[in-house]
Amino acid sequence: MAEILVVAEHRDGKPADVSLEMLSTGRRLADQAGCGLLAVVVTSDVSAFAPRLARWADSVLAVKTGKPEHSLAEPYQKALASVIRERKPNLVLLGHSSFAMDLAPALAVDVGAPLATDCTNIAMENGAITVTRSIYNGKVNALYSFAPCETVILTGRPGVFPVEEGRGKGIVEEIDLPVHEEAEYKRFEGCSEPEASEVDITKADVLVAVGRGVKEKGNLQLAEDLARALGGVLACSRPVVDYGWLPSGHQVGLSGKTVRPRLYLALGISGAFQHMVGLRGSKMIVAINKDEKAPIFTDADYGIVGDVLEIVPVLTKHILEPRR
Amino acid sequence: MDIVVAVKQVPDTSEVVDVVEIDGSGKDIERGTLVSRINEWDEYALEEALQWKQKLGGTVTAVTVGPGEWDDTLRRALAMGADRAIRVDEDATVIDCSAAARTLAALIGRLPHDLVMFGAQSEDFGSAQLGPMVAEMLGIPHAALVVRLQVEEGEAHVERELEGGARDLYTLRLPALLTIQTGINRPRYVSFSSVRKAREKELSVMSLDELGLPPQALTPAVELARLELAPAGKGAVLISGAAEEAAARLATILREAGVI
Amino acid sequence: MDSICQSLAEIVGEGHVSNRPEELYIYSRDLGTAEPHLPRYVVAPRTTEEVQQVVKLANREKIPVVPLGGGLTLAGLVMPLRGGIVLDMKRMDSILEVNERARYALVEAGVSQGKLVAYLNTHHPTLVHSEPGAPGQATVAGNVAIHGQGDLAQPYGFNSDMVNGLEVVLPTGEVCRIGSCSLAQQWFTQHPLPDLGLFLGWCGTTGVITKVSLRLFPRKRIRDMGMFVLEDGDLVPDILYRISHTEMAGDLIAWSQELPVTVSGLHNISIFISGDSEEELELKRKLIRVGILGEYIHSGVGGLVGLSANVRPRLPRRPPVSTIQDIKKGGGFEYVGAIMPVDTYPECCRRGAEISARHNIAYTLLGRVIGRSHAMMFSWSYVFNRADEDSVREAREALYESDDLALELGGIPWKPGVYGQQAVMERMDPNTLSLMKKVKKLLDPNGIMNPGNWEVS
Amino acid sequence: MALTEYRYSDVIHRCFRCGYCKFPTSFIEVNNCPAYARYRLESYSTGGRLWLIRAWLNDELDWSEHLGEIVYSCAACKNCAEQCPLPFSDDIVDMIVAAKGAMVERGSVPSAVKEFLENVDRQGNPYGTARSKRGEWMEGTGIQEYDGQEFLYYVGCVGSYDTRAQQVARALGRVLQKGGVSFGVLGDRENCDGNDVGKLGEEGLFEALAEENIRQFKDLGVSKIVTLSPHAFNAIKNDYPRLDGTFEVRHYSQLLRDLVRAGKLDVSSGFKAKVTYHDPCFLGRWNAEYEAPRDVLRAVPGVELVEMERHRADALCCGGGGGNFYTDFLGGSEDSPSRIRVRDACATGASIVATACPNCLTMLEDAVKAEGLDDRLKVMDISEIVGEACQARGS
């Protein structure tokens, strides 16, 4: 194998966690295959990123661009396409992020490479790459291989691949590529930060999180009572925000907030990864769910299989009046 | 405003439906007991398309690549208010994203399209690839994970969802392709009678050949080796017993663990 | 939710406040012909303290407050004419005390007539209150706030004359008790304290009544009724006078209606009597049937139905009002009630029939004797089709004409709508008028209480 | 749908909003309409609801999730129909159902209702649990699949899927076995009876379900049906015939009464307790069956039957009707009808509140927990009480 390329995504002057996860993975695979690891970053501030990336990568290609300060698909696609055409890496790694969901498929078509997204495992046996994807609501794992080809593009599921601090000292090469930040057919108009909400769930010690399983806005009261009994606050998974039951400030997960409470009590949440990545830092996870096969039970410390609406009121009662 | 919406039909494997088994081939799940539904993200895409048709006039065409059973989903799309539906008759369960993208690009390329909408991802495979691939093949701008849309004077102003609730704002020149994230709207209920009425609406079926695609256009670049049931529930210590009893024990556990 | 809605929610709880279109729509409409007026908020308090806080807030923010009971005045008296807060009192519906010996009931303002009747039936079968014959959800407090009368009006007068004490939240937020309750937990009398009758008949423009102590009366075990039917309405006042003289009758009602045709043109006098024994009942029957009506019957003036031991009439479970209103199959019904000299009954009927004819609505005319023929509440009723604008307008005009008629005949419109109120005040002695103005200004400096009603210009 | 196309356009404005619809016959409480009891705002009374419906159909008011909730908070309990003094009283519930139908046709319904209907459409039950799990409740009961037996025992969605109601479904099965009744069930082949689907205004889906069931019943040669749920009983008895599905259907309480009277069911072991009975709306007000369940209870030695102040035609609904046991627009408050109802039950001094409907059962049981009355009041289905009373001594 000749080379592995990792695309480094950044936001607010920091490389994305998932990019570091991919760098570590890339490093591991490169060492295993005895090939080089190349990192590519498109940024207006090369010095801020390149050296950091060089700890994992043997070499870093820093593509200089003007604004904006965070990753946009268009400039990356142009830069990466030409790099890939020129250097023909065997493997291109990106994190399965919003950025990559916009970029990777177009890039794959652009350079005519096969693409597997949201991989939960990436393995290499005598040069051949196989990946695992989690499908059907996490109930099934699918294993994929690739027809012989020059380059395979993969995106890795955030929070699944371990990060080992890089120890290397790669060389940084700043290159100048024709980067179109402003394609006339697609203008970047800026970005908006998440709306502030009255409660800051990221600072809460105890979170009572509700999902689809609470069935109806009216039932949020039950969860709220429990939260009050536990001295915690209400959090939720995406559907609850989609239904307009709670403001987005309460949402935990990929498109919501990342939390680290002492106790995360998940009510009627199935545990899709987009949600789970948001609560990895929790000390203790307890799940109550009807479906004994719900993925959340895989990550939870304790679980009760049953009807949330039935159990929660009773639980609240027991929290309030400890039996002596 | 002519809008094309790509939809797909998925087996209902949502939280409370948990009877998923691998079939003999090891490459598919037992579909016998599973019921099908329209992919949730596609439902939002359709609703969004229909609301813009309502505002700006024009047509909404629902398209898919799939087997005959998927007509159910197209009929549902028609019932929701789509003007016509086209199915490319291929077994989508065995082809990969790039093949599906190629097929849809060929189809959509032949249709009037100021706007093309896809669900941001599918419930079953969750690849989130199809939309941007098709956009690249059609050579039109795209934006993935759109949570807000404003269409005016040949332009689409969109908000893309990023991690942590942040959003990127773009202006795309039409024609453009958007992949729609859930929550962008409230999909309407599709009544039984409206599905019945939709039977009169046009639902056409096309073959690869009619699209001028050779069979090898479907050769997958990504090959499915096999499926395995995910190890379920192994992590958690499950507290058994009736609600009363289980809740009591959990309360004790929480107390002893000092989390409360 | 705006900030005021927020603070209202903090007072009564989020579930009991609304500024959503659906609630505002419903509370903007009266059952009668009045044009709708949108409130800004709807609030349903549970306690006097909550009412107090809401009123204080409203007074501070200078937002109108309109207390609402059963909402059955039909004259639009509980419509938010100037927007603001509609205070739905019906959650305050506890019966706090029934004192059997002193014969009174202490109730919260939202207690319905129906609930009080049912409660007395089960728990105090020897007591009754004067039931106004409105649908059961009419409230006790609302009824006295408009000087209502009930089925004991003939022997005992206006319901508002039966009030032993009140708890009121003043427009400035103080909770004030009127009567013996202002000295101690004693709700048995208003007198002999200096008269503070500033709330009865004011239709909620001087404060929010939160508690009422109402007199109860002996309930006789057996009830009976009879109906004297005659053609010559001119004789009715005389007959009523003589029946009331016997002091044997309970409710006394003279009525005449165009439909069904079989009764058209006739006058009917409904005579209700009651007794604890057949003997008592028979004595009363005799004194009225033989002693009074006998000679009319002999002279062939009219005939009597019932009032005899072997004919048992079916007493209606419900007041007829809710069914009468549907004659036009239009769901609309409103009447002008006026307190009139009993002698005007014939003229009230004649002129009432003319008004009805002009607006092509079948006439429904009724006079209920108040006290020993001291007065009568005479009502001109008009049905209309809610779904038909013209029909609504016809009824509205007929109502205005009836207000004018009442005044012309020397009577006073009872619980009149804004039109009738103005007509009354135009004719009122200027000194009386300015006293009313002073009282209102004194109690309600910011003019927040049910503004638009009884406003002295 | 415009007002003119609305089936009751010539009637709906005739509601005077006199308010009788809120009360029981005695007027003792203003909260006998479950939705009004819960919210105590005029908008939630039947009269208010009718006026709002008219305003919406008349384009005086836009549809909103809140309007949807107001209309769908009607539990179709029929108290209003019972109390309304006007000639169109029998149509009131239909007026509201027809308005729900208009919302369904426009596609604008509250999300919980959308979920309910889509779940039933896909999985044949409101919970969205797999069709293939419908028969799991009967495991180990020895109850047979229907195969020409005298009775088809139709269980319904709640009895098939709700863990508590499953116990009742099994209890009734055992009682029928003890009574020597020849019966079978459909297990996984059973489908939603559609009663609540119809009351949610989804007429098309209701008819599809009904026709499917009727076809299946006929194919299997079913002539007699006994139902666990009064909801199914109501649909099969009153709605299936117009779809050419006429069966001899009985609610199980009626069958149990006959079995006891005929001495086929030995309840002599008795059941010692003070019991009050909650009338399910779809057995009582909808089908005027007030006595059968009471007769069964009276027949059990040791049962002391006491009545709540509001009973029979004046019973307060548990708030679970019209799909509300799932959509739950009436839950989450101490004013929730189910909680008022268990307080009523407690006031009788009874230690058991018995009912004959799995929806009522689950609603009341949750309410008992919420009220913290667990140690004073137990919720039981009549079949469970009979079940205990016919523990044949020795065997």
Image: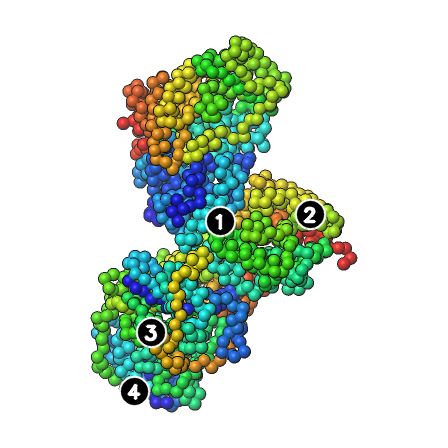
- Give the amino acid at mark 4: Arg
Q: Nearer the viewer, residue C123 or C74?
A: C74
In percent of width and height, residue C259 lies at 46, 25
Q: Are marks 2 and 4 on the same chain?
A: no
Q: What label does residue A87 carry, if any?
A: 4
Q: Which residue is mark 1?
A: D330
Q: What amino acid does circle 1 point to?
A: Leu
Find residue C226 and report its horizontal and vertical position in percent: 55, 20
Residue that badge 2 annotates: D257
Q: Are marks 3 and 1 on the same chain?
A: no
Marks counted in the figure total: 4
Q: Position of residue B237 (x, y in %)?
A: 55, 69
Name the front one of labels 1 and 2: 2
Of marks 2 and 4, the one in the foreground:
2
Asked if disc 3 and disc 1 are in contact, CB closer than 8 Å, the reply is no
Question: Which of the two labelled residues, at mark 1 and mark 2, occupies the earlier sequence position?
Answer: 2
